[in-house]
Image (spheres, helix red, strand yellow):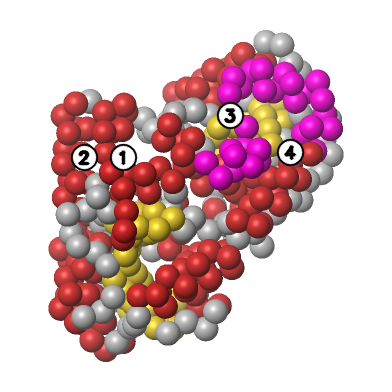
Amino acid sequence: MKVLFTKELFSPYIAGGGEIYGENVVRGLMKQGVKVQVVAGSWGKSKFENYKDIPVHRVNLWPMRYSFNVKGYLPLLNVAKKFRPDIIHSNAPQASFPAFLVSSQLGIPHVVSVHFLFLKEYFRYFNPVTASLFYVLEQAVFKVPYDKIIALDHWVYRNLCRLGLRKKSVVIQHPINTNIFKSKRRKHDKIVIGTVGTLYGPTKGTNIIFNAFKQIKEKFDVEFLVVGKSTDEQKKMFEKIGAKVVGRVPYKETPRYYNKIDIFIGQGMSAKEAMACGCVTILNEPTLRLKLYHKPEINAGAMLVGNHFKIIENLLSKPKQIKKISEKSVKFVKENYRTEKIINQLLSLYKSML
């Protein structure tokens, strides 16, 4: 099988979880014997390169990453004509439109991965003007008749269904590389409570994490660890309550920090990676969006939801619970989110489209 994978950014140009997803998927497919070529943007010149054995056709994104929706069309078309893929796999919203044009022109089945789909949830986090703009643009992206749509979580799937796309949509979760994200815990004197990931931005819930730390510090003798890119104000805020603040670290070094944390407070992909490393993980902001995002692990009891202070108070009074939930979390991620399982689900979807 041959797959043409496209995204506006691809490693080593990493802006967030979407780029990590892309590399995990491509390497996972190649490991299964699938021939893959990638068309993606970069902040340099347009060129072809082998990025750590992955063939990547780079497109200059100047002046911004969103330009890939225009600039990506011709490179995608040229590569598709030469490579003759069985499937085109794109990512919404920045690469799905040019991929749709090429798939329609050449008659190649096209599947789109959707990392987020906020709809009216934008109005929770942004001012009315910005939220309205995002809302309209998002609606436009999904007016395009894609062949199949992959929801990376149950919140996205719910919203795809609300847009009338249930028959085209399927949930296939974000893969976690459990060969890298695994438990390597060492004993330490005090319980460490922490978080890892990008801290700035209206959807990150950093103030909720800070307030939880502050309340916990007043009663318990624990340590706090904060890892990730933050604003100067956020750094000072955490340092003021005695937290150790580490800036952004290379992605492949993050397992070392997860393994220093006993109780993790956070959300999204970083929360799943924390679980894979054996952290007892508490959802930072129990909104409907995040509870649906983490629906499988919450239902399995591998992620905790509720009042952070009460949950931690209960855990600290019952140390055996920490070990028990830690082991359950590791097992859950291996059974449900490991890369090999997710790639097999993708391959089954591809085959159903051919």
Give the secondary structure at mark 2: helix
Q: CA distance from mark 4 to mark 1?
A: 31 Å
Circles 1 and 2: CB distance less than 8 Å?
Answer: yes
Magenta-drawn segment: 294-323
Q: Is residue 29 left or right of residue 183?
A: left
Q: Nearer the viewer, residue 75 or 141?
A: 141
Task: Kindly identify which residue carries mark 2.
Answer: 134
Q: Disc 3 or 1, which lies upstream in sequence?
A: 1
- Given the image, on which type of amino acid does mark 2 rest? Phe
Q: Nearer the viewer, residue 271 or 302?
A: 302
Give the secondary structure at mark 1: loop
Q: Disc 4 or 1, which lies upstream in sequence?
A: 1
Task: Kindly identify which residue carries mark 1.
Answer: 118
Badge 2 crowding class, 10 Å Cα cut-off, few under 14, some 14 to 19, many 20 or more, is some
- Given the image, on which type of amino acid does mark 4 rest? Ile
Q: Disc 4 or 2, which lies upstream in sequence?
A: 2
Q: CA distance from mark 4 to mark 2?
A: 38 Å
Q: Nearer the viewer, mark 3 or mark 2?
A: 3
Task: Kindly identify which residue carries mark 4.
Answer: 325
Task: Kindly identify which residue carries mark 3.
Answer: 305
Specify the quadrant of the image occupied by residue 105.
bottom left
Specify the quadrant of the image occupied by residue 92.
bottom left
Badge 1 crowding class, 10 Å Cα cut-off, few under 14, some 14 to 19, many 20 or more, is some
At x 31%, y 87%, the residue is 83
Badge 4 crowding class, 10 Å Cα cut-off, few under 14, some 14 to 19, many 20 or more, is many
